[in-house]
Each structure stands twice: as structure tokens, then as C-alpha cells.
Amino acid sequence: MKGDRVHFLTGTDEHGQKVYRVAQSRGMKPQAHADDMVVPFQKLWERLQITHDDFLRTTETRHTSVVQAVLQHLFDRDEIYAADYEGWYSTTAERFWTEKDLVDGKCPADGSEVEWISERNYFFRMSRYTDQLKAYIKDNPEFLQPQSRRNEVLGYLRGEVRDLCISRPKTRLPWGIPLPFDEDYVTYVWFDALLNYITAIGYHPDGPTSDAFSEHWPATYHIVGKDILTTHAVYWSTMLFALGQRPAQCLYAHGWWKVEGRKMSKSLGNVVDPHLMLDCYGVDAVRYFVLKEVPFGSDGDFAHDAFMTRYNADLANDFGNLAHRALSMTEKWLDGLTPALDEDTPRDLVLAGLAEETLNTYTRQIEGLQFSTALESLWVLIRAGNKYIDDEAPWQLNRSGDMVRLGGVMRRCLEICRIAAVLLSPVAPNKSLEMVKKLGIDSLSLTNVATLDGLTTGAKVAAGDPLFPRMQALPEKIQAVRDAALAAEAAAEPTPKKSKNKTKVTNTTPTDGLITFDAFGQVTMRAGRVVTAERHPDAERLLVLKVDIGESEPRCIVAGIAGRYSPEDVCGMMVAVVTNLKPAKIRGVLSEGMLLAVGGKEIQAMVTFTEDVQPGAVIG
């Protein structure tokens, strides 16, 4: 919209052991399975009106041929070597783990089963570029975002970064891109797939590169889920260094969505069907909710009740109400023609200043990927437009016959609607276009968008149907799915067994203060890495931490350590965590564990580790 040349790439990663095994279970060849699975993604992006410039499948020749060229290029320069390797392998995570990595003998990433594998493989000298990556992160503070993810990667780099196994023998996995220097192996999916970001725009290690690559790399924004941050921040960056290239200007890792406070689960049936949402709510409302409800980068909780509340409050009551009042009063009292402006009053000048400020704030927040904050800044202007109507009372101006002032007031309200429509168009493209057409405009433009003199005097306006009709209740189809998920969840809850023993239990703690080994064994402790840290909103001595203990997502732990440590001090720190304490709210924030520290109430130091340990490792 600003006139910049933009290239938006997305696509599908189609190699790897998981794809191969699922294809086998379906009785299909891997390529046929991939061809089948890509269609729903492409159709959904169309329905969501996601207008990418390119959609790359990693099974396309334009990708696979360059991957092989890159492999040969690095092999010839001794960046790739062969070595014997053995370790615990997780098919779901598609990576090797050491003994100390495992949590209860299972994959620390997702809790899946692992198998012992001993074989010869090829390795990329990733460790060679660890110091360069540390320096790059330090010299480019905007590279890894949000800040918590930057701290997470730096914490990872403080440990031992080993060379990356980039091959799989065909005897175990025949599905993948063959190594050009050894036909008995295929490429590890996380080496193959990462290269798509540059193969799609014409990179070739032996040159010449395309004009598109020269123009668009390094990318401005590279957006990934937080669960694959390490592969993109460490694997991908070091691969680029080995190729003499730079990473993207901003690598941003976003969070996950829960549903009604629970992780999405197919067994519970609480997985949100995007097609059902689009059918029931419309594409503009869905896009708005996803971007507005949760700050980008944080985890979010999806609930249909919250959707209806957000829709009614923001879209129906605020923007919809402003548009309907401005258009209907112009139709009713001013013949449906855009009136001329009158001389500015102090209140008019304040509104004009807010419009200019809104444009600047909105632009800055969008460019910083802070979509929720950007939309909130726009809604400040929309709410100001509604208040302006209340303060100016155009109904009184109409009764008094002051048509000049009435026209000026309504003109400014219509201008606020135009500004809102233009700025909202990246989020709600259909309703935005509908809005400007109601104003007698055919297209959306950023030219002089923030001025309160952008409409054409005398142009015909039309109120028509409400832009966002108020939602009185959840759609029947949504309610039916929601009820079924809640019923499945209730059925899945274990029923407590009634105890036949009615003996009264008393405190059996020994008077000498000693406990048995069995009593101590009831305490579960694990190693954890502090992922994020911030000050408690209502307590100066408390920090609110997110701690990775090898589970699917970090735990929230409230710790009374703010007198000794700042949030910056503890991010990335390895800590000891008691994990089986009953969760409790501490000054309004739910805490799901306890950290071990020295000093009692006056904290002297956190309990940490001298050796490199993995999050989730058992202490005991």
C-alpha cells in the first residue's frame, strides 16, 4: 500500500520421515500423499484471502536441484563431512538426542518414543559458526524477536552446539532429496526445507543469482512458530553464513493458540475448524480477531464467547456504529451528499491531530509486527469519532437549522470512517472496500489518508445494511461443535474412586523434623531454562517467568527473586524446578512450580548447574 515492492513467500515442506510413515499408513506413495495434502492448505489460504506471491513445495525441481547444488558446494569446501554416529532418534521430532537429553526415556521435545540408532551419516560443521552467530545477534538487536525468543536462542548458544547431522540412509528413509556426493543417502528434512527461502527467489551457490534474489534477500521479515525457533535461528543462520549470506533482518517467532484454556486435541474434538469459522463469521471478522485478540508473539486462548465479545465490542459497536450514524444522518438530513467542511473549532483540530497521530502509530506498529497494538491505536480514533458525534450533537444542530456546522461535523465523521477503512483494509479487506463504497469512493488509497479533507464534496453516500451486524448468539453450528467438545472433555476426565477407608488421617510428620526417603521421593524436580521473565504487575518482589522443563510448552512460575535478579539477568538461565507442586495463584498470577534458591527470603543465588543439561532432565 505504501508503494514498496513486496514478495511474500509461503509453501509446504514435503520430505522427512513423518511424511514417509504417514504415506505408508495410507497405502500411498510419498509424492501422492504430498500432492493430496497440499490442496487443503492452498484452498484455505484462498478462502482467507492470503495473497502470497509464491507458494513453493519442497518437492519441486526448482527447489530440489538447488538443494543438491548447495550440498555439493558445501561438501567441496569441507563444510560437510562423514562420520559414524549413534544416539536416540525421535521420528516425530526428526532428530537425534543424547541420553542426558531424554525426559523419562522419551523425546524432550514432544514426549514421543525414541529408538537407538547407530549409523554412518554426513554432518554440517554448524559448530564452526557458533561464535559468528553470537556476534551477529549481539550486533543486530532487531534480528530475533520478540525479546524473549532472543534470550531463548542466546541461552541455547551458551550450551554445547554440536555439528548438525544432515543425512538419512536410504535403507531407513528413502523419501528425500538424494545427496549428490553419495546416492545411498537423502537430505535431512531440516536442511532441505530451510533452503526454500532462497531457492524460491532464484539463489544458486555457483551463480548467477536472479534479480529477485538480489532485490529481496536478506528478507525483511521471516515469521515462524516458536516451536521451530532453534532450527531457524541456529541451523538456518549458520547455513547462510557458510554460504556467505546474511539471515533475514527480523526473525519473528509467534506463539500458539489454546482452545477454551486447553491445548488443541483431536481426541477431545476441540480443534478449531477454520472453514466452519469462515462459514459462520466471515473472513474479515476471523482475520480481525486473530490479529487483535492476542499480542503477536504471545500465546493466545481461543474461545467462541471471546470471539463474539470482541466482534460485538469492536466491529459492531465501535466501527459499525460510527459508520451507521455518520452515513444515516448524512442521508437523512443532508440529502445523502457529502457535505463541505466548515471552519475548524478547537475540538475539530484535536480530532485532526489524532488522525495524523493514528496514521504514524499504526504504520510504526504494523512494521514492528505489533498487529494488536496497531489495531488498538486505530480504535482510539474510531472511539474518538463516536465521542465527537456525542459531543457535537448533530441532531441538535439539525433542529436549530445550523446546516453549515451540521455539514462540517458530518463531513469529519465520514472522513474518520474513510481513514478507518483504509487502515483496516490489510486486516478486513472486504468490509473496508464496502465501507469506502458507501462513502462514494471506488478504491482504497493511502494518499493523504490522514487528512480530514479526503472525500469529494457532493459525492453520494449510502448507509445500506450495517457493516457489522451485531451478533446476538453463537451460530448454531458453532454451538453444536462447542457442546460436543465440552462433552468429550468431561467424559475424558477420570472419575475419582470412592474410598472405603474411613479412618481419619492425621499429621504423621516426625517430631524430629526428619522425613523418610519415600516422602522425599514424592517431590519431583527437573532442570529448566528460563525462556521469558517480567516483573509481576502487582508485586515488586516477584518475577513472572516462563520456564521450559521439556514439556510441550513452558510453565508459568512466579518467583520472589526480584530483589536479587532483574528479568534480563535470568532469561536463558538454567534453574532447578519443583514440578509437582499444586498450582496456586500468587497475587493474581497462576504459578505452576517453584524454583530452588539459596538464602531463604533474602535470595542470595539461584540453584543452577555447572554442566550442560537439557530442560526436563530429572534432578534426584
Image: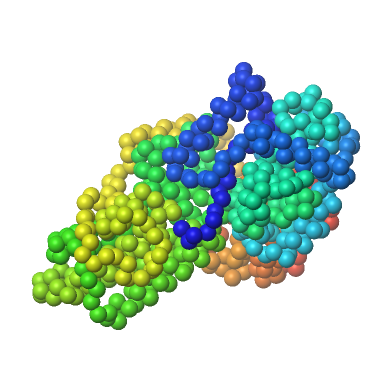
Q: Is residue 160 visible?
A: no
Q: Position of residue 234 (x, y in %)?
A: 73, 51
Locate residue 214, reporting x and y percent: 66, 54
- Count the marks: 0
Residue that appears at 70% across and 43% down: 195
- 560 displayed left or right of 103: left
Reply above or below: 100 against 356: above
Give me the residue at 81% from left, 28% from top: 183
> In the displayed structure, does residue 522 sit left or right of residue 449?
right
Q: Nearer the viewer, residue 282 or 34?
A: 34
Q: Position of residue 159 (x, y in %)?
A: 80, 53
Q: Residue at x 84, y 33 (%)?
A: 181
Q: Please report the residue visible at 67 percent of the width from the left and 38 percent of the height from the top.
A: 63
In the rendered image, the residue lying farthest to the bottom is 346
Q: Quadrant of residue 589?
A: bottom right
Outermost residue toward the top in this view? 27
In-image side of 151 versus 162 (left or right) = left
Q: Position of residue 605 (x, y in %)?
A: 76, 65
**Residue 301 visible, this angle:** yes
Give the answer, above or below, for where 446 lies relative to 477.
below
In this orientation, which residue lies closer to the viewer: 401 or 2? 2
Image quadrant of residue 516?
top right
In this rendering, the answer to whether 262 lies above or below 393 is above
Colouring convention used in this rendered image of the protein: rainbow
Instruction: Tell me: residue 552, above or below residue 480.
Output: below
